[in-house]
Image (tube, rainbow, N blue to C red):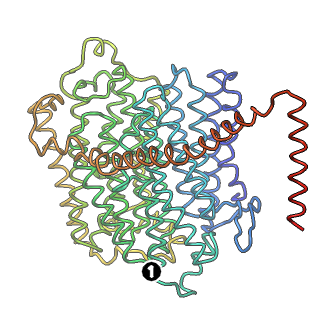
Amino acid sequence: MEQLVYLIPLFPLVSFIIIALFGKNLSKSITTFLAPGSILASFVVALLIFGAQLSNNHAVTVSLLSWFHVGNFNAEFSFLVDSLSIIFTLVITGVGFLIHVYSTGYMHDEKDYNRYFSYLNLFVFFMLLLVLGDNFLLMFVGWEGVGLCSYLLIGFWFRNINYSNAANKAFIMNRIGDLGFLLGIILTFGVFGSINYNEVFTQIGTIVVDGKLITWITLLLFIGAMGKSAQIPLYTWLPDAMAGPTPVSALIHAATMVTAGIYMVARCGVLFSMSEFTMHLISIIGISTALLAASIALFQNDIKKVLAYSTVSQLGLIFCALGVGAFSAGVFHVVTHAFFKALLFLGAGSVIHGMSGDQDIRNMGGLKSKMPVTYITFFIATIAISGIPPFAGFFSKDQMLAEIFVHNKVLFVLAVAVSLMTAFYMFRLLFLTFFGEFRGNDIQKNHVHESPKSMTVPLMILAVLSVLGGFIGFPHELGHTLGIHHWLDAFLATSVKMKATEMTLNTELILMAITIILILVMIVLARTIFLSNKSVPKSDDEAMPLWKEVIYYKYYIDEIYEAIIVKPLNRISGLLYHYIERSGIDAMVNGIGASVVNWSQLLRLTQTGGLGFYVGAMVVSIIVLIILMFVKI
């Protein structure tokens, strides 16, 4: 069954080719069937392979062709099916299919409907290539491919200059990270003589490698992860990516692109585990990003911006877990996060659809009676991301917190703080959007309605997954080992893993109880402020305390980047353009051209048309040649 793995990326690729080539002649109904259908077909194949893997969990490499061979460098176009890749494949195709179905309703009136779905299918193809490839080069192709597609999708409405700028920002910031990733791959080949995962990882322990080289390799690879998964300092592109259609936000922020960095670190866990410095750095950057983004989300008023910063925060929490060696716990949270974060974004899209495109939560309120399905599903996702049992987010977040606690108590306290802020800003968002009185205008009030079934059915399916998804892993206090840990054991056998058994049962129960109580306190606090006291965020024009203003404007980090990076580079570029490009290179090239013209004008004066002049010139020339001959002799 594993031999059919090539069909998984093939289906969306074929769909992309058909829609891209014949899009102008394809009706919407054909695209509506073809685009989601190809993703569903990939999901079915992935599910069949997963079923085969359940009975015999072992890694299988399926080689399609020899890509190229230069000297001792060999690159195969082959796929790796193991416990890690199949989990990511199921999430990408499963959640991706639901987002495709949702898009058929959300984008139904879009003029460039076919172009949108061609981009979406190409995006899924490259993401599948990234997680299924069995070597770093194939991963890099998928890595660059999703970067390109994110640029196309974020800037889908490119006629709006702000959206185009957001797409440019995402593309450029990702290129910074990608350079580090590429250098890491090159250094990996230089040290291990291969880019194949198995050949690289099996050499660890059998050959002696300079620890500094391993540190440099892992640092460079992590720089790539910082770009793709939006970690400090390369995170500012992701909130701006909200410029794209809302289903794109769900696809990028939930199941695909932003998880690429996490997948890469988990895939190379055995390599990262060899560098204690890099692991510490990953934890520090992860928890710093989580705290920064969570604090910003507390005061945002754009419904999608709140969710965007929530994504950055959750990714930071996952990287913190990866940094302490909790690879399986991190992957577990990637899965549950895909369910409830996709649901939150699609729910936000449903709200925006009902609000005639308005995204400001200050203009909402009282929507639960007008949009009951959207409200209930959004409520479920809010509970799940807050980490309340028995919803999906509780199980995965609890496991991460437990393993972080074993490793570092300070990181644990900070991670709990992130969880508390998450509960507060998510319930703030829920209360301001769905409770109280409607605060929009009369036109919006008359327009608000529940979304069509093409949008609400995916919401309901994701809501079920957000409730039940956590049961693929049970906490240790229930007397069970994590199911997902068992599934990943074969892959993680050589990786350094934290042992949750180092924590006693009573300690884990106490920590869990304290965390849940504190989360409930945050929910009550949010309810008191935004429901009982009916507090509504002020408009941007009204004065606010300095500390709140700093956080509301995202610590002015974009402005700082503009001042210390963008403007100096623009000035340097201007100087280089003026003095090197214009006064140097252009002047030299133009000078050569002008001199040719001037000499030509001078020489043309010799063309008098008089026969005597030509005969005289010929005689003089012959005399000069004869003289030169004798001088040479």
Q: Based on the displayed image, in which of its 4 quarters is residue 68 positioned?
A: bottom right
Tell me if mark 1 has few (under 14), some (14-19) or many (20+) residues whose alpha carbon lies within 10 angstroms of its own.
few
Q: Judge by depth and name the residue closer to the eye, 258 or 420.
A: 258
Quarter of the image where the N terminus is located: bottom right
Query: Which residue is drawn at the image coordinates 29% and 52% (left, top)?
Result: 387
Please name the amino acid that badge 1 sits on. Lys
Q: Judge by depth and name the residue closer to the eye, 91 or 162.
A: 162
Determine whether 239 is above or below 359 in the image. Answer: below
Q: Which residue is mark 1?
A: 212
Determine whether 136 is above or below 548 in the image. Answer: below
**Image coords of residue 199 (percent x, y):** 63, 75
Query: Which residue is drawn at the image coordinates 51% and 77% (left, top)?
Result: 494
Q: How many marks?
A: 1
Q: Based on the displayed image, in which of its 4 quarters is residue 465 positioned?
A: top left
Task: Answer with left or right where residue 145 lies relative to residue 335.
Answer: right
**Image coords of residue 585 (percent x, y):** 55, 47
Task: Answer with left or right where residue 199 lies relative to residue 577.
Answer: right
Give the SS element for disc 1.
Answer: helix
Task: Answer with left or right where residue 282 lies relative to residue 617.
Answer: left
Quarter of the image where the C terminus is located: bottom right
Query: Which residue is drawn at the image coordinates 71% and 59% (left, top)?
Result: 77
Q: Is residue 453 visible?
A: yes
**Image coords of residue 461 (percent x, y):** 46, 38
**Image coords of residue 194 (percent x, y):** 64, 73
Q: Is residue 384 visible?
A: no
